[in-house]
Amino acid sequence: MSEVTNKKVFQILVDNNAGVLSRISGLFSRRGYNIESITAGVTAEPTITRITVVTSGDNDIMEQIEKQVGKLVDVRDIHELKPDESVFRELAMIKVRANADQRENVIALTNIFRGSIIDVSNESLMIEITGNSGKIDAFLKLVSGYEILELARTGVAGLGRGTKNVIYLDKLV
Amino acid sequence: MIAADAIVKCLEKEGVEYVFGYPGVAICPFFNSILDTNIKTILVRQEQNAAHEASGYARITGKVGVAVATSGPGATNLITGIATAFADSIPLVCITGQVDSNLMGSDVFQEVDVSGACESFVKFSYIVRRAADIPRIIKEAFHIAGTGRKGPVLIDIPIDIQKAEIRKFEYPETVNIRTYKPTINGHAVQIKKVIKELNKAKRPIICAGGGVHLSGAKEELRKFVEANDIPVVSTMMGLGALPTEHFLFYGMVGNNGQAYGNRAMNDADMIIMVGARVADRSVSQPDLITENKVLVHIDVDPAEIGKNAGPTIPLVGDIKHVLEEFNKATITADYSLWIDKLDGYKDDTQNASRRKRHMYSSTLTEEEINALTVNPEIFVKRLSRAMKKDAVYVADVGQNQLWSCANCVIREGRFLTSGGMGTMGYSVPAALGAKLGAPDRQVVAVCGDGGFQMTMMELATMKQYNVPVKIVVLRNNVLGLVRQYQHFTYQDRFSVIDLGDSIPDFRKLAEAYGIRYQQIAAVEEMDSGIEEFLADDEATLLEVIVDPKLVV
């Protein structure tokens, strides 16, 4: 057994059946696989859902994840989104406490990160920021001097670059 | 036509002969419609047994077994049977009634989320939401259960859906599940690699698992090993893949297996796992089977390959197909030195066990014990030898199972047991199902007095439908395997293992159910007792008195 723990992103294409997300997350939990984030959304083909899972573990666990998930009857495809061949994005909504004096500063930071202000009140600002997880982490670190009232992160979504690894949905139907 | 009519029509189209089940309101539309078909129904006495009976039937016929129960407690009772089938990859379609679909989720009477509860031990499950989906779902369910790595599929059908009208019934000819396409044919390149390695190997061994039976590949395996003189060991689930007294068979492996079988595995330079999971009970140290060895792992389920041991050559495919391909190849290597060595191991162990005074941890002398009780190992040997060539031996769980696997003589017959889950009480209902599946074969269930008391209510089913199963209860008034564990691990601090001396009186019990009773209480009664027990084809309960202090 190898001891090296690494992080991987898997893209899973599933039939949009009732209970499919619970089947996948249930499989992870009962076999003791780690889920760092999981996102799901319907694809251009409404009967197929794309699930992106960020997970970590040693190589043997990674291989088992791929095989055990691939074995589920309603899973069409699972493969790794390799970091250098893929693009990842995550969206975060951050509500910070900021009065009129502090507002300018927060807005400036947000602009540097190409985020946008999506809600303002007398005492708070809501920031939307999109990017890979590292960028969001960096931004959160920067605004940690302010009081973060609420934070919502979507988890990672990803796609492979170019046309090499495209799975054509019309061939699945 | 209502949906319930469609369900039973689908079962007819699938060639279902028996439905094992227990009714309740939520499944009544189904049981009403089944009256209009030729499908025979078997009323079990507890739903768990419906799944076990369907399992015994499936394993003997090679068909998919069908178990049906009602919602709520009916469904939860079925669960142990479903999990048992899942652990041993037995193909079942289990149908449960469900409360009205408009009431689902509101905790009404006899509602339980059975598909949620079973999620981790079914191959797939359906909750039927539209009556029109029924033909497709049932077609898919049988296909999923019976192909690839087999297993149980659950279909939960709300009562209002069962009663809903279906405008036009059409049973699909083919299945097209875009997400489910099991690999059947082994990869040609990998097959060639295995043959090449076999030609290089000096000490190859095949370890046969339950997959050999599930894929119906016994003949192919035998042909392959006989043509090339390759020795074979088996897991518990693989027992019977080769006759136990075959000149190339070197016993069962694992912590309950034969020492010479394990020694053979350790000394081999090439191991071919055929439809075996490399599970903890058969290979306790997976690292050892890869060390300085070529490991070939053949399985229809790619997820099993590399799960516990990384093979040199992974080979995904149906065992029967792969062995057919092997049989086309030529192997020139000569393994006779290796076989001589293995024969030596076998003799060593057998001599050692003959020398072993006895396996008792008893205060009585061997003679005293023989006078009062029957040695179960000798009993199993004599019983199985006296059984018909193609008989089915169904072993339960516990000490009796270990005595059975180590001593049962299997020729052309089958050895069935709950290997993966170790479900006590499996043998009696599984034997009943097996006998219905193969009425012309002799079927013998061998269990302990603990396991028997978990499913003895099936004596009523046996009597009612006149299913002549032979049942052996090895009686020691104790939960022997737990006793043995407490003897070694807790220094004889025995806890909750005593079944009570002579409770129940099995003679009266058999009489109450209208089943013939027989007893063997001492060694000298053994041979005549076995002869009498097997003489005819009538359901018989044979009580064999065994010393409670035995250890396996």
Image: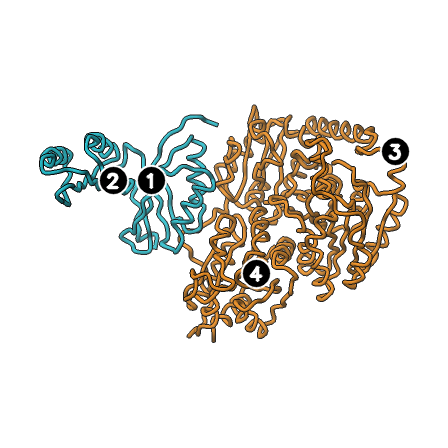
Disc 4 on helix, strand or loop? helix
Q: Which colouring convention does the figure follow?
A: by chain
Kindly report which numbered mark, 3 or 2, lies closer to the viewer in this rendering: 3
Residue B103 located left or right of residue B283: left
Taking the spot 67% from the left edge, 56% from the top edge, the residue there is B429
Mark yes or no: residue B264 visible. yes
**Label placed on residue A37:** 1
Q: Is residue B502 above or below residue B15?
A: above
- The residue wearing badge 4 is B74
User: Residue A37 or B388: which is nearer the viewer?
Assistant: A37
Q: Which chain is orange?
A: B
Residue B131 in the image: state x and y as whole percent: 43, 68
Give the alpha-carbon distance from disc 4 to disc 1, as whole Å: 38 Å
C-alpha span from label 4 to label 2: 46 Å
The chain displayed cyan equals A
Write down the chain letter for disc 1. Answer: A
SS class, disc 1: strand
Disc 3 from disc 4: Cα separation: 50 Å
Q: Chain of mark 3?
A: B
Q: Is residue A80 left or right of residue B463?
A: left
The residue labelled by disc 2 is A90
